[in-house]
Image: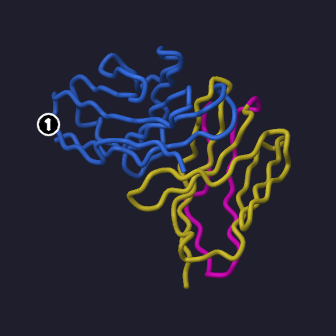
Chain colours: A yellow, B blue
């Protein structure tokens, strides 16, 4: 199937780390993406990882990829209230189209 | 920073009317896409476009939908006869390199409401 699965909701306290998990299906996916969507807004590309990498770090964001288990995670260090949003993971197919998960709503409590 | 721009940001239309959503991809990009997101649901692929032709389309992209690149800058999505279930946010996206490389940039979206 084409399903990319994410948990629907995560709540953390400001200053804590957030970990958002995703599982995908296609072992031929070459890139995996994390997008952020704030209410009423578009899709902001946060980061992406090439499938031959295990980890990518970009400031407060760390992406971990377990290709064997087809598991992707996004860790946000020192989570801030401005990080509250919906986070989508997506896998790219060889044709270039992205298959999105259903999104994880991150709630950051002060 | 270059960005994908979409117009209109919101359009309200009557069922059965034709709608054209417009996108200006990033200028040196070669691959263009339309996605849609029904309220509260996941983002779904509609169509990809390269070298002035459709390279892939989903089951959603039926005969009521068409895409066009009428000039060197615009990329449009036309819905010929809108239905209530076409109400959604429509996102345009573009990519510089070959089909499966690197960053895919999205516009802010066009919200379509069909009454």
Chain letter for mark 1: B
Magenta stretch holds residue B26: no
What residue is drawn where x is 33% and y is 22%? B65
Residue at 34% from the left image edge and 44% from the top image edge: B110
Q: Nearer the viewer, residue A52 or A6?
A: A52
Foreground pick, B15 / A80: A80
Task: Indicate whether A65 appears above or below A29.
Answer: below
Tell me where residue B80 appears, x and y as whole percent.
24, 22
Q: Which residue is painted at 51% across and 25% down in the image?
A: B48
Q: Is residue A46 left or right of residue B76?
A: right
Q: On screen, A31 above or below A104?
A: above
What span is in magenta?
A: A1-28
Could you say which is closer to the camera, residue B39 or residue B29?
B29
Task: Confirm whether the magenta stretch covers residue A11.
Answer: yes
In which quadrant will I find the C terminus of chain B?
A: top left
Left or right: B113 with respect to B1? left
Residue sitting at the far bottom? A110
Residue B107 is situated, as x and y percent measured from the top left of the image, at: 45, 44
Q: Is residue A80 above or below residue A99?
A: below
Counting labels gives 1
The part of the image, by quadrant, that contains residue B20 is top left
User: Residue A8: which quarter of the image?
Assistant: bottom right
**Residue B102 x, y percent position in the rendering:** 68, 38
Residue that numbered label 1 is attached to? B14
Q: Name the element at disc 1.
A: loop
- Badge 1 crowding class, 10 Å Cα cut-off, few under 14, some 14 to 19, many 20 or more, is some
- Identified at 53% across, 73% down, the residue is A82
């Amino acid at each position: 199937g084409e399903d990319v699965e994410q948990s629907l909701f995560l709540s953390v306290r400001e200053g804590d780390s957030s970990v958002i998990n995703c599982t995908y299906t296609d072992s031929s996916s070459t890139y995996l993406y994390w997008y952020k969507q704030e209410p009423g807004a578009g899709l902001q590309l946060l980061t992406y990882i090439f499938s031959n990498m295990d980890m990518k770090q970009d400031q407060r964001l760390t992406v971990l990829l377990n290709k064997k288990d087809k598991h992707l995670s996004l860790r946000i260090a020192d989570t801030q209230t401005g990080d509250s949003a919906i986070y989508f993971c997506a896998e790219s197919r060889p044709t270039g189209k992205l298959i999105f998960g259903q999104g994880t709503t991150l709630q950051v409590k002060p | 920073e270059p960005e994908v721009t979409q117009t209109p940001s919101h359009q309200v239309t009557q069922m059965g009317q034709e709608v054209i959503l417009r996108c200006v991809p990033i200028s040196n990009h070669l691959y263009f896409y339309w996605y849609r997101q029904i309220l509260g649901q996941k983002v779904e692929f509609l169509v990809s476009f390269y070298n002035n032709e459709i390279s892939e389309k989903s089951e959603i992209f039926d005969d009521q939908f068409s895409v066009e690149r009428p000039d060197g800058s615009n990329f449009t999505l036309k819905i010929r006869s809108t239905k209530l279930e076409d109400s959604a946010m429509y996102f345009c996206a573009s990519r510089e390199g070959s089909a499966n490389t690197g960053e895919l940039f999205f516009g802010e979206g066009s919200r379509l409401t069909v009454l």
